[in-house]
Image: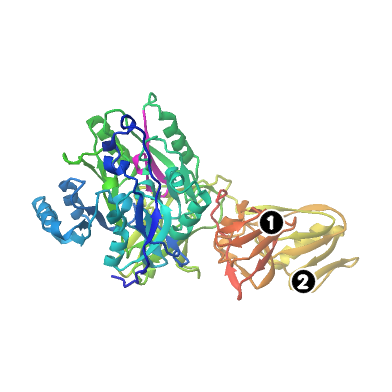
Amino acid sequence: MKNIKLFVLVGLLIGLPFLTFGQDSQKPDWKKLHYLSEEEMLSKERSSIYQETDPPAGDYVRFPAEFEPMQAVTIRYPLGIPTSLVKQLSERTKVYCIVTSSQQNSARSTFQNAGCNMNNITYYNMSTESYWVRDYGPWYIFNDLEPAIVDNAYNRPRNNDNMVPVYMGQQLGLTVYGMNLTHTGGNMMEDGRGVGVSDELILNENSNNENNVRTKMRNYLGIDPYHITIDPQGDYIAHVDCWGKFLAPDKILIAQLPTSNSHYADYEEVAEFFANTNCCWGYPYKVYRVYEPGGNTVAPYTNSLIVNKTVFVPLGSNNTYNNDALAVYQQALPGYEIIGVTGASSTPWENTDALHCRTRGVMDFNMLFVDHRDVVFGEQPMQDSIAITSKFIAYSGQALKQDSLLVYYSIDGGAYQTAKMTSTGNLYEYVGYIKGYNYGSSIDYYVFGADESGHRYSQPVFGAVEPHHFDIEEGSGTTTTEQTVSLSSGWNWWTPDVDLDGATLLSLIENGLGANGVKIMSQDGKFATRSTYGWSGSLTSLEVGKMYMIQVSSPCTFSIEGNFVDLTNHSITLSYGNNWIGYFGTQPMSVNAALANLPATVGDKITGQDGSIATYSRYGWSGPLQTLVPGGAYLYNSKASSDVTFTFSTNNKYNK
């Protein structure tokens, strides 16, 4: 267990919103409101002990997703789940059971009688008021390499429940960060790559201060973008896990209602939003729908729990709908074990309260995280190779197995090959290259890593069963290209976009300029000048990746033919200050995508000849300059204190 200091803070009383109701005849059925009893609804007491702290100070704060590796599942005793589920959990992972010391023997007897793996059950003695540990339990994060907990102000008058994150932090030796937002776990889902989703309850319970909500989610959890949707169910509970669920970074499950239901259009609106919103990998979410008929039929299918490639799905009151729901999960998660779970007779499932609400996963503090963010997809231009860049983060602190950092790829349905990944020089980052394809090739691939602690992981987690996929554009098979050079009267910025010998390039430029040519100049002060006797001067060769200034007496256009430039074989070195560089890709590419391999420094700027600028911040490149074009020349101002060398990215992602 990592020894991490716990913040010791003075308890801060924070008043939470008071839910008011009219006459007794107007009170809602409290049995459906699984967070408040009738007494609690009528109580005017809405204060709770809460500890606010500064946010994590690490450079890389990450809120892991439920579908990432888990070391345990937290439950509370007395149970809100059947003992058969505790048994199944204990056979697959650790079970952290929150129970008072006086009830621990009862819990142990219950679990023994159910046939649980007792070696996998750990008891944490603390008092609680309810079994909805999803909402009041700890939110586990990584602050750089260290596990930690983020705590929220719980929106219920239950101080024991509200203190569980602090108690668990003490027991596990983790720092607890207090995020001053009223929030609940049932209204939060995240993809582990910085994308989060909640419905509008998050705004309603925080004075509708959207800027404050987004700022805190980013600072404490690393969540940005944060999608705040409507509440399609229109129910008091207003929790996202009652209608949706992230299944993978690019997959989301959303309930579907019959067209006769008054909320049908609301559910369709949310489903359409995600179907038209890019996931963290740059393309729209794959939306899976699970049918929930509504009415008196219990069908809480999105309220499931994912634990290490096993999905526990709460079963409803209709076997046909149950089987259909299990089939949707199996389709969306190939290779996973899908297990249906019937609720206990004493604590049955409800449509707004089922298995997910009553459990809380605990991330594997020592996981190996494979973060291949620049996924290659769609149709790619023909080039010598495709770069696959990924971060490998060993939270165990153990070394990576350098010979086990691999890109697995299959060309046109053939056997999988491997490409070894090597360090780019950026923290945690490695790159490998896919080669050997042809025009029109279809390519599947996934990234794999392992570390010395024995942890292994793939992206996608499905591996060869459901890999990433892209195609190479159709073509004639030629390896040559033609660059058209169009120059205006006066000075022009230009860069070569064909791969030729440097002296040959200069000769072709001089011949193409003809009588229109005046001067060609490089950043180092070398130049070639035209006179009646031809060209002369200190500039004798041109270089791919460099920008040149060309002066002409009148507009002219000509062409140069040569080989495509292999982006992986031509690097660019930037020095402090201004650098004349050129982009030689085969297709236009966004600044963020083209410079993905560059370890830019905050404050770096890239400028086009038209004066448009992109500036680098901790959130990436932004500004009027959005796209680098083939043959485009640019002025790059570097703030780095030492030279930086990089290659242009080969990942053709226009929407990043």
Magenta span: predominant SS is strand
Q: Which residue is mark 1?
A: 631
- What amino acid type is highlighted by mark number 2? Leu
Q: Residue at x 43, y 57 (%)?
A: 180
- What amino acid type is highlighted by mark number 1? Gly
Q: Image check: 533 left or right of 186?
A: right
Q: Which residue is mark 2?
A: 539
- Residue most extreme to the top: 260
Q: What is the magenta range?
A: 241-257
Q: Answer with the quarter of the image where residue 322 lies.
A: top left
Q: Answer with the quarter of the image where residue 572 lies.
A: bottom right
Magenta run includes residue 247: yes
Q: Looking at the image, can residue 270 be seen?
A: yes
Instruction: Give the image location of residue 598, x and y in percent.
Output: 57, 64
Give the Cα separation between the discs numbered 1 and 2: 20 Å
- Residue most extreme to the right: 532
- Give the vertical position of 109 relative to 425 (above or below): above
In the picture, which quadrant includes the N terminus?
bottom left
Magenta run includes residue 283: no
How packed mark 1 is, by other alpha carbons closer than 10 Å (few <14, some 14-19, many 20 or more), is many
Q: Is 558 in front, or is 172?
A: 172
Q: Residue at x 42, y 43 (%)?
A: 201
Instruction: Give the image location of residue 321, x and y in percent.
Output: 27, 31
Q: Residue at x 87, y 55 (%)?
A: 554
Which label sits on residue 295?
none
